[in-house]
């Protein structure tokens, strides 16, 4: 007898155990580990239509300033998306929580004034494709706000990070990698990386492989380098 196929579409991301863990630990990290202050800094001064990629349980939502007219929050993981939808109800700005993945954003090109990634580029399957999608959906001059952890500056810790990324870390932490370099990736994707600062998460306490973070802003350039035209 042929096997029946489920009519329920598979989620782009399915990490139910990690999702439960993250839903709890992230709230503690926000309130006791100072992450809420980083979220406030990340989103300060944003305005217009914003797309947030990998919104998780929606902990950024409470920090959007009133000048933001709408947030489209993309979250592929089902249980986190449900929590994000609840968080959206309590946000001061309109937030629409939508399933989808960074590598194929379900929105029109050049539709957003701003985009936000926080603790997400470490986890997406294909960083260049995700950044190319973010660039596509931003208007020229639109800004990408980022708060991401990545590669440590020291060789010893970077070696540890690479070893963990090849073995247990992604498996333990929902596909997260510790040795990615978000600044280099954004530059390679054609963003103009503006002001940013390095920070340690958590700020106090031991340095973990996931402690080496950057917070700042990059822009989609107004013009792209088009191939020279033959005018002869
Ligand atoms: C560490 S959590 C961060 C959540 C949230 N941005 C925050 O700041 O708390 C990583 C998030 O990325 C999401 N994610 C994983 N792969 C993704 C993908 N390909 N596209 C978009 N989001 C993804 C996960 O489901 C999860 O919500």
Image (cartoon, grey):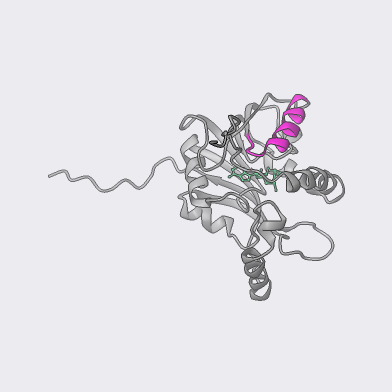
Residue 47's image quarter?
Answer: top right
Residue positioned most to the left: 232
> Which of these two is toward me, 40 or 98?
98
From the image, give the main secondary structure of the stretch colored magenta: helix
Vertical placement of residue 62 versus 212, above or below: above
Residue 83's image quarter?
Answer: top right
Q: Is residue 139 visible?
A: no
Drawn side of residue 104 relative to residue 227, left or right:
right
Range covered by the magenta-colored residues: 74-89
Q: Position of residue 26 (x, y in %)?
A: 79, 46
Q: Is residue 79 magenta?
A: yes
Q: Is residue 130 magenta?
A: no
Where on the image, by quarter, is ligand 1? Answer: top right
> Which of these two is toward me, 107 or 45?
107
Residue in the picture at 43% in, 40% down: 222
Q: Position of residue 187 (x, y in %)?
A: 49, 54
Vertical placement of residue 78 versus 146, above or below: above
Q: Position of residue 103 (x, y in %)?
A: 52, 43
Residue in the picture at 61% in, 38% down: 11
Q: Is residue 87 visible?
A: yes
Residue in the picture at 76% in, 24% down: 89
Q: Quadrant where the C terminus lies?
A: top left
Residue positioned most to the right: 32
């Amino acid at each position: 007898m042929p096997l029946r196929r489920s009519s329920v579409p598979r989620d782009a991301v399915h990490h139910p155990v990690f999702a439960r863990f993250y839903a709890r630990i992230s709230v503690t990290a926000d309130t006791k580990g100072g992450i809420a202050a980083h979220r406030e800094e990340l989103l300060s001064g944003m305005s217009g239509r914003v797309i947030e990629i990998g919104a998780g349980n929606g902990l950024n939502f409470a920090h959007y300033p009133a000048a933001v007219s709408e947030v489209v929050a993309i979250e592929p993981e089902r249980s986190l998306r449900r929590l994000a939808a609840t968080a959206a109800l309590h946000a001061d700005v309109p937030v629409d929580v939508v399933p989808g993945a960074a590598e194929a954003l379900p929105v029109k090109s050049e539709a957003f004034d701003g985009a936000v990634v926080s603790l997400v580029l470490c986890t997406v399957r294909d960083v260049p494709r995700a950044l190319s999608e973010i660039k596509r959906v931003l208007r020229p001059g639109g800004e990408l706000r980022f708060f991401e952890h990545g590669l440590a500056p020291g060789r010893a810790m970077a070696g540890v990070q690479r070893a963990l990324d090849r073995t247990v870390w992604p498996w333990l932490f929902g596909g997260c990698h510790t040795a990615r370099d978000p600044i280099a990736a954004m530059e390679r994707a054609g963003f103009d990386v503006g002001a940013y600062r390095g920070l340690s998460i958590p700020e106090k306490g031991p340095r973990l492989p996931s402690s080496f973070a950057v917070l700042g802003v990059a822009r989609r350039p107004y013009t792209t380098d088009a191939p020279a035209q033959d005018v002869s």
